[in-house]
Amino acid sequence: MEHKRSDNRVRSVATWLLLSAALAAGAWVAAKEFWHSATPEMKEANMSPKQNLVRAPATEAGPMPEEEAAVTSSMTTAGATALTAPTPIPTPTPLTVPARNPAESSVSVAEVDAHSAQDVLDQSVSEKKEDTTEANDDEYSVIEFIPHMYYSRIDGQDRDDGSRGSLLSGANYGFELKWRQVISPHVHTYQNVRVNREKYLPDSETATAEIKGATQTLTGYGAGIDYHVNDRLLIRGYFGLAQEVFYKGLSSGGGSVEIQPLLIPRFEVGGAYRFWQSRVFYAEAEATGTLYLPASNNSYRANMGYGYQGKLSIGQDIGSWSMHAGTFYGYTQQNTSILKRTRKDNGFELGLSWQLGDTPHRRTP
């Protein structure tokens, strides 16, 4: 009985050994074929297969039977051999780039530079168009109508005999029509027309004299520019032509005094300061200096003269409309070839302006 058991055990062990040998032989053949097909880099990475062997863990139950140990050994060897052989990695095919002529390369670089420069130019033109559009959004016009009333006094002294005389006016009146172009928040240009009607009476020193041309209609026109330094302060320049009252005849010994208007070129420089501002109302002061240029007619010649004017006003902004009221005082000295002459004006004005366009109103003094 024992003899049969040992024969069976021997047969079982022999069978397991044959199976293990067959598995080991198959794994060896597969590894050998892979090793021949592997790249040199892969061979260098796998020169030490012993380091990649997987060892079967020892069990706590003690030593295994001989049959199981043999099977386990054969399976471990086959598995270790299989793990040792890495999976083949496909070798990337290098791209073949045709050689380019240096001339072609320079042409291509030039084309790229030309396209880049064109893109920069197009972007610059687009930005300029946007800036122009934004600037155009700030442009609008304002119409101003300013009626006024004032009193004048003209004092003269004859250059030959020193005779003195004065002309006093009644209630002179007129208006100024101004068209303003708001080019930007800082720069405004304008053109204006003035029409005044003046009437003069003799004072006590010239009471016996007859005044010829006592009533006169005087006109003037010009153009100017305002520069707004900030919301409160502006600087103004103006050039125009306006008729001024001159007269002759003081030395005639009680004869007639003749008034003769003369068209005088003038250049003005001034400014305005808004010293008080509320949500709707404002108050401002304005000062102007005037240089009168020479002019002449058939009877006499007017020399260069000067003058100044001061004005205080209050106003109110209502949407696209603006109103203001002010009082002013002016002084002028301009002599002629036959008379020393000074003039004083004192009056008040009412102004109304309205905006042309949809841009929010910005009042300008």
Image (spheres, rainbow, N blue to C red):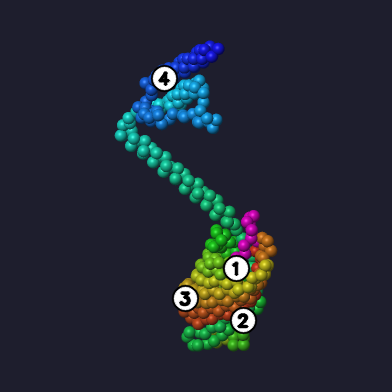
Q: CA distance from mark 4 to mark 2?
A: 136 Å
The question of residue 334 being in magenta is answered with no
Amino acid at circle 4: Trp
* Placement of 30 over or under 342, stated as above or below: above
Residue for badge 2: 168
Residue for badge 3: 304
Image quadrant holding the C terminus, namely: bottom right
Residue for badge 1: 365
Left or right of 24, for residue 131: right
Classify residue 92 by image quadrant: top left
The question of residue 358 being in magenta is answered with yes
Residues drawn in magenta = 354-365
SS category of the residue bearing label 4: helix
User: Badge 1: few (under 14), some or many (20 or more) residues near its Cα, within 10 Å?
Assistant: some
Q: Disc 3 or disc 1, which is closer to the eye?
A: 1
- Which residue is located at x 50 percent, y 82 percent? 340
SS category of the residue bearing label 2: strand
Q: CA distance from mark 1 to mark 2?
A: 31 Å
The percent position of residue 81, horizontal first and vertical second, equals 44, 24
Q: Main secondary structure of the magenta part?
A: loop
Mark carried by residue 28: 4
Amino acid at circle 2: Leu
Whether residue 8 is visible, yes or no, is no
Image quadrant holding the N terminus, namely: top right
User: Badge 2: few (under 14), some or many (20 or more) residues near its Cα, within 10 Å?
Assistant: some
